[in-house]
Image: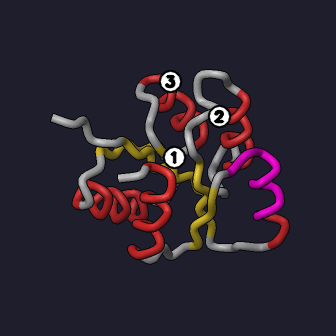
Amino acid sequence: MKEKKSILIVDDNNDIVTTYGVVLERMGYRVSVAYDGNQCIEKIKEDKPDLVLLDVFLPGLSGSEVCRMIKEASQTKDIPVVAITASMSTDTKKRMTEVGADGFLLKPIDVTDLSRVIKEFVGV
């Protein structure tokens, strides 16, 4: 039996984490969550996910700092990181692209957009 692909959701808003988690689990993915940048880095070390959905604005380490850390580490640099933001400003997009973000989703996330991005980066 094929193992489920895993997705790490990183957001400090519990409602968003819960909503995305339910949707992704119904789509057949294994979901883990982190509520800040430090938890994200720890979760990635524990269980290398197939995709990280990363909020840009997090308490503590920012989304851009976390993305940079993921992309600079040899063990995690190949994990796709999709930046999630309510403000798709030019500055935000530029900053996240510079640190290695592979894609973007605008909050509130439409399920069709979420599905498209996941298929693009996870392939299932």
Picture quadrant of residue 99: top right
Residue indicated by mark 1: 52
Q: Residue at x 78, y 73 (%)?
A: 89
Q: Local crowd at mark 1 within 10 Å, few (<14), some, or many (≥20)?
A: many
Q: Which residue is mark 2?
A: 70
Q: Residues within 10 Å of mark 2 (few under 14, many from 20)?
A: many
- Residue 91 forms part of the magenta stretch: no
Q: Main secondary structure of the magenta part?
A: helix
Distance of mark 1 from mark 2, alpha carbons?
10 Å
Whether label 3 touches label 2, CB < 8 Å = no
Marks 3,1: beta carbons within 8 A = no
Region in magenta? 93-101
Toward the viewer: 62 or 123?
Answer: 123
Considering only vertical position in the picture, is 76 above or below 56?
Answer: above
Amino acid type at circle 2 is Ile
In terms of depth relative to the viewer, which is nearer, 42 or 114? 114
Which numbered disc, 3 or 1, marks the residue that appears first in the sequence? 3
SS for callout 3? helix
**Which residue is pictured at 22% across the width and 60% down the height?**
26
Q: Is residue 119 left or right of residue 40?
A: left
Residue 2 position, x and y percent, is: 21, 37
Question: Is residue 1 rendered to the left or right of residue 99?
Answer: left
